[in-house]
Image: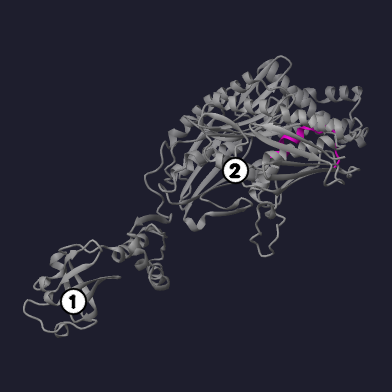
Amino acid sequence: MIKGCAVELDGQTLYVETGRVARQASGSAVVTLGETVVLVTAVSTDEVREGIDFLPLTVEYQEMSYAGGRIPGNFFRRDMGRPSERETLTSRLIDRPIRPLFPKNYHYETQVIATVLSTDRENEADVLAILGASVALEVSDIPFSGPIAGVRVGRVDGRLIINPTVSQQKECDINLIVAGNRSGIVMVEGGGKFVSEAEIVDAIFYGYEVLQPLLKMQEELREAVGKPKREVPPKGLDEDIQARIRATVEPLLQDVIRTKGKKERQNKRKQALDVLLATLGEEYEDEEWLIKDAFHDLEREMVREMILEQGQRIDGRAFDEVRPIECVVGILPRVHGSALFTRGETQAMVLTTLGTELDEQRIETIYGDQYRSFIFHYNFPPYSVGEARRLTGPGRREIGHGALARRALEPVMPAKEEFEYCIRVVSEILESNGSSSMASVCGGSLSLMDAGVPIKEAVAGVAMGLVKGEDKVSVLTDIIGDEDHYGDMDFKVTGTKDGITALQMDIKIDGLSKDVMQRALEQAREARLFILDEMNKTISKPRSHISEYAPVVTTIEIRPEKIRILIGPGGKTIRHITAETGARVEVDDTGRVYIAAPDKESADLAIKMINEIAQEAEVGKLYMGKVTKIMDFGAFVEIFPGTDGLVHISQLDRGRVNKVSDILKEGDEVLVKVLDVDENGKIRLSRKAALGETLEKDV
């Protein structure tokens, strides 16, 4: 059955249809805004694969080239299988709000695919894909505690707008994606340009208020065309077994959850689990995974009770206390900028490399090709958490953390006109116990300063957590891994002393109030200021110079009339400069000359050669020129490459000259003085005025 619904959002009509296409999927939806169209499908298998004791959910978002009227630029001219960074990040945006809404014991392989079929290059497809995923799941037979919906919230000139266009986003000082369900906000992702905590909270809750009609629309669709949901048999242990588990390991877990060191705590946890399995494992061999689940559920319960009732954190810190911080810069001799940022048991070594325009990242999208001059990469090797596993390319988590760090630092990066370099920052996580992405932001800020990049302000980040009981809420500053795992919120906030630059929030509970969010953001602000103070003790402003090992990038201006001369016939002159100096030279139509050289010596030589070519004749100055043409009325003399002037026959000698060829012939070198340069750039020269003088004397 085909069913469609339209919803008005901030003057825009969003249309959702289900039942027309992809009918063999468990559920499908087509979402349209403007001329942007996204198809989302959801499929779940009928049987559980052997050995699966988790939710095998995969979410794929793909932007097809035909959607933007483009043909792929690769050799095969087809959309390749490897997703782009943008596609990966959007897949994460869809995954994060829907994953917690599946039943805990639902272990059927489930796949959600969002495909952009058309784009008008103004209305973004990501929020449409979030909505479409929820609709597809709602009308399917897949158990899902939805609906959810997402909207983008922007602010232009102080006014909040919903789903700003690509053009409007360039003017936004707040740009957030807010996802929520009937119970409350479930996800926030975005950034701002040094905005206050109160402004961020207002934007988030405005977005949540606006998305309510999208939830109602999905409920109506589900009632009209939704399939009956699958029955998921409850799987659990009876009360007697749970009591035996508690009696066996509760005393051991009391020690585990009060052990401060991560590695020691992991060892004690493993020992406690081994004791439990040795006690009950043989008797309940087929239910071992349920016993393990019950073990971790018990630990979760005990950690939360310790925090809520006893006011005690796992590592003994106060709720608003940041772990000990150590900052070091300039740790590596040859890299252009380096920093080691350590916070508790989380450590990031962050390296900055300066490059030229040739190093900029070309990004091919359905919106057109883009070039990125600030690149941030995040690496999470297995040794950082004491594991040994095969090294692979970056996964979704690494790509997501790198994008978050880049977004956090972008507002403080210098304008291209101020700093001509391409900048790549790499965060190598050497040790991890929570908040490694925020350590990357702090280390990135330090590393950029060490590299001499003139960033506007230092940037720091902190991850906030939350534990919510029936009548108590505890907000935790700078959470460790176990607090993230057993808590109800992971809220990452970055910014300068003046305001927020980026945030990312995932909530696992219902009904996070505005007051609690304000409290969390205020606590994050206090922590951020503390961290910035610690960072400033090591380096408080960018170095005044870049590394001697960095390339030299500079620009000079020449008159547009000189562009042709600088380039030369078929590019001959500019290629000669590159061959002689090793510098890359480019010139645009305005006369701006871009020079990228491997070192200062090469850059200086290239500038000297360019200035010689592009120099202007000065009245009264002597030049050693070359006769290029003899005429009856005088001789044309090239005084520097591409520039010549006329020596009239009367200016050849002190006495009368009957024939120009009596004095000069083509190819002769002759010392001349500039008499005049008229408004058209024509140069009058004199040999007579230069007689008796030497070039050295004039210089």
User: How many numbered tags mark residues here?
Assistant: 2
The image quadrant of residue 51 is top right
In the figure, 414 relative to 299: above or below? below
Q: Is residue 557 left or right of residue 344?
A: left
Task: Give the image location of residue 108, x and y in percent.
Answer: 86, 41
Residue nearest the viewer, comparing 236 with 368: 368
Task: Give the image location of residue 73, x and y in percent.
Answer: 63, 61
Task: Give the image location of residue 217, x and y in percent.
Answer: 77, 31
The image quadrant of residue 296 is top right
In the figure, 32 relative to 595: above or below? above
Q: Is residue 107 magenta?
A: yes
Residue nearest the viewer, comparing 629 with 359: 629
The C terminus lies in quadrant = bottom left
Q: Which residues are magenta?
A: 93-108
Q: Is residue 292 visible?
A: no
**Amino acid at pointer 1:** Val
What mark, if any, has residue 403 been given in the picture?
Answer: 2
Task: Give the image location of residue 664, x and y in percent.
Answer: 17, 82
Question: Of marks 2 and 1, which one's residue comes earlier in the chain?
Answer: 2
Q: CA distance from mark 2 to mark 1?
A: 63 Å
The N terminus lies in quadrant = top right
**Amino acid at pointer 2:** Ala
Q: Residues within 10 Å of mark 1 (few under 14, many from 20)?
A: some
Residue nearest the viewer, comparing 629 with 475: 629
Q: Is residue 257 magenta?
A: no
Q: Residue tagged by mark 1? A: 670
The residue at the point 91 percent across, 43 percent down is 47
